[in-house]
Image (cartoon, rainbow, N blue to C red):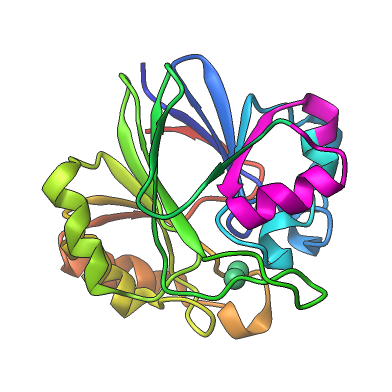
Amino acid sequence: MRPKITYYGHSCFSIEISGKSILFDPFITPNPKASMIDVSTIQPDLILVTHGHGDHIADLVTIAKQCKAQVISAYEIIEWLSDQGIKNGLPMNIGGTINLGFCKIKMVKAEHSSSFSDGSYAGNAAGFIIQSNDCCFYYAGDTALTMDMQLIPLSYNLDFSFLPIGDNFTMGVEDAVKASKLIECKKVIGMHFDTFPPIEIDHKHAYDSFSDGGINLILPLINQTFEL
Ligand code: NI
Ligand code: MN
């Protein structure tokens, strides 16, 4: 089955694999560009959270409560959720893998920071590699280009990857092209771009830069569902 992906803006996607839906980094209601999305209709089976910054967790508590999805994130974020009554979290840390039956999830390093809006510690920023019968993909979270990415293709044959491309807070386009080469992935879905003025990008330049590197870039439209 081909994975079906819906874009909710910024770095928030849901992806359907093996009949289950996984939501990444829910940030919707504070994003004026995603105002057409009704958060109450989002009912994932699983929520994956890369770090504690507001632009990745703004709607986490609401969605986790409404759908009773399991939440996978850093130990510190799962503790924080537990304090708010969300008890079905699965804590992980970098380097660990868990097997959920329908997929295996590995938490990998991201070169970024992670704190809650009050400044308290939210663990290490992370990315995830998801492996199912349908596909294997990398969701990088917020990260700089880092040599650690070279480790990924030693163990995984990625079908596609979600990479930040907005620059300023994460990699920009040029570094994301280099990252695609380090991870040996030819199909990239761009994220973390255009939401705020500092991360606005030139779409044509982005498409050209990736295609010059032999990589197929997808810049998703908000509220769009597409198959890979
Ligand atoms: Ni961040
Ligand atoms: Mn961010």
- 118 relative to 133, above or below: below
Q: Quadrant of residue 108?
A: bottom left
Ligand 1 quadrant in view: bottom right
Residue 70's image quarter? top right
Q: Residue at x 58, y 64 (%)?
A: 123
> Going 64% across and 50% down the picture, which residue do you hit?
222
Q: Is residue 98 visible?
A: yes
Q: Give the left or right position of residue 148, taking residue 213 as reference.
A: right
Residue at the limit of the structure toward the left, as seen here: 154
**Residue 153, how many percent across, how many down?**
16, 50
Residue 205 visible to the viewer: no
Image quarter of the N terminus? top left
For residue 23, above or below residue 181:
above
The image shows residue 18 at horizontal and vertical percentages of 44, 16
- Quarter of the rendering containing residue 33: bottom right
Q: Which residue is located at x 85 percent, y 42 percent?
A: 62
User: Which quarter of the rendering shows the C terminus?
Assistant: top left
Q: Is residue 78 magenta?
A: yes
**Is residue 210 a member of the stretch shown in magenta?**
no
**Residue 165 position in % (x across, y down):** 44, 70
Q: Which residues are magenta?
A: 65-87
Closer-to-camera residue (29/205):
29
Q: Residue at x 67, y 54 (%)?
A: 77
In the depicted structure, whether residue 25 falls above or below residue 150:
above
Total marks shown come to 0
Which residue is more in the foreground, 81 or 144?
A: 81
Left or right of 53 in this view: 65: right
